[in-house]
Amino acid sequence: MSVRVRFAPSPTGHIHVGNVRTALFNYLFARNQGGKFILRIEDTDLERSSLESEKLIYEDLQWLGLDWDEGPIIGGNYGPYKQTERYKIYKKYIQKLLDEGKAYKCFCSKDELEEMKEKALKEGRPPRYNGKCRNLTLQEIESFEKEGKKASIRFKVEDLEVRISDIIKGEISFKTDAFGDFIIVRPDGMPVYNFVVVIDDALMEITHVIRGDDHLSNTPKQVLIYNALGFKVPKFAHIPMILGPDHSKLSKRHGDTSVNQFREKGYLPEALFNYLALLSWSHPEEKEILSKDELIEAFSLDRVSKSAAVFDFEKLKWMNGIYIRNKSKEELTKLCVPYLISEGLVTDRYVNENFDKLADMIESIRDNLELLSDVAQYIEVYFKLNTILDEKAKELLVKDTSIPVLRTFLSEIEKVDELNEKIYKTIVKSVQKSTGAKGKNLFMVIRIGVSGLTKGPELDKLVVNLGKDEVVKRVREILRLIGNHDF
Ligand code: GLU
């Protein structure tokens, strides 16, 4: 039978990295096995779900390259793929359980249930429903309904042991007396997660349920429902959770944790994809930099570890830097443009008219980038001359050779028609010869002359990319500052 797996997010905001790692493992497993990866929207919590959030989920998954084979937008043979569109289906199975005496209506009020719970806790028993409405007669039910009382529907649970053979966690057994008869439909008519998830997984012929281990305790309840309805129980694989650097569960407290935040900061989807795949899974040869295809090829559930993974923000950044360095010049430029525009360094028009020039500038600072959003800070030097010189710059400029270096550099540059690296090198040699300055006294002084800074892109690239006119303008301005003791 061919593999069918699903990712079933609740649309309550952008996807958290923990959740998207679950999607990723499902995706990798499906692609590795030549199976299907299905997206299902679990939107039965009407208060917390929104269409807006659904869209965010689609965007996040698409950005990361987790394309689904069946699901919202594209459809499929097992739809609809949104739970709010499946009520009719759920109703049928609820009725079936009621008809077969496997579920029953419960009219107990909130207060009664609260009392039951307190009593159980006092007596040191697990708080579970005491079965009060298990055997109501038809007349009793009718009269409650006439009174306008709303019933929840409970699933009848016999005392037994449910054994689960989890692909990751191994053999686990659960005693059902820990939870007892549980609600499958709330008094407002809404079926609950533990019920609908079974109907959907069964009817969508899901073969492997791969999800976070926070759902492990739900699994025995779900298995009971599979059995009661005569559905085949899928295989389960519960993935360990992700911890923050302080080893507590990864959350907003630790910084950026939703996919869109990573995207906005300038992480590349390939880098995040690669990094997330290594959280509780490892390559058989412990390789770390792996393309999507390599991950698909190597992925298996046997290599998913039982223990939680720690999210290492620094490592992700480092990995992102590697992916940035591997981009083509043109691609990297296109990726950087939105960051430059939002920082106000360039306009669309500038980009259209100066794309190649911009690409050269970005190329000169590529090695500094770990995040795309770093680009503005490194490239600013091309757009602004810094005129507030720091101490290090001032110390250098007061040396005897500094003004002659800048003056000679300026007059040599003024003589040429345009700049390229060869011409620049010849000019620097001649400045060195006529002023006797070398090392810092030569190169750093020129750097300050063209940027007002003591750090920046490689000097020859900086000068050439700035171009003759801009260099002339800048060196004059710096000379003016020195002349006026304006620093
Ligand atoms: N909607 C559930 C969640 O987001 C899905 C759980 C499951 O995969 O069964 O946690």
Image (cartoon, grey):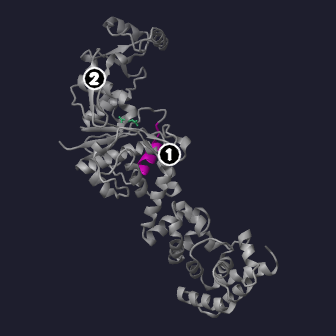
Mark 1 is surrounded, within 10 Å at the Cα level, by few (under 14), some (14 to 19) or many (20 or more) other residues, namely many
- Left/right placement of residue 290 relative to residue 348 reads left
Residue that carries the numbered disc 2 in the rendered image: 162
Q: Quadrant of the C terminus?
A: bottom right
Task: Work out whether 275 lies above or below 352.
Answer: above
Whether residue 127 is situated above or below residue 221 in the rendered picture: above
- Residue positioned 72% across, 83% down in the render: 402
Q: Position of residue 314 (x, y in %)?
A: 50, 53
Q: Which residues are magenta?
A: 49-60
Q: Quadrant of the N terminus?
A: top left
Q: Foreground residue, 339 or 350? A: 339
Residues at marks 2 and 1, CA–CA distance in whole angstroms? 35 Å
Q: Amino acid at mark 2?
A: Val
Q: Is residue 50 magenta?
A: yes
For the point 60% across and 89% down, which residue is it? 429
> Which residue occupies the foreground of this view, 420 or 190?
420
Kindly tell me whether residue 69 is visible in this rendering: no
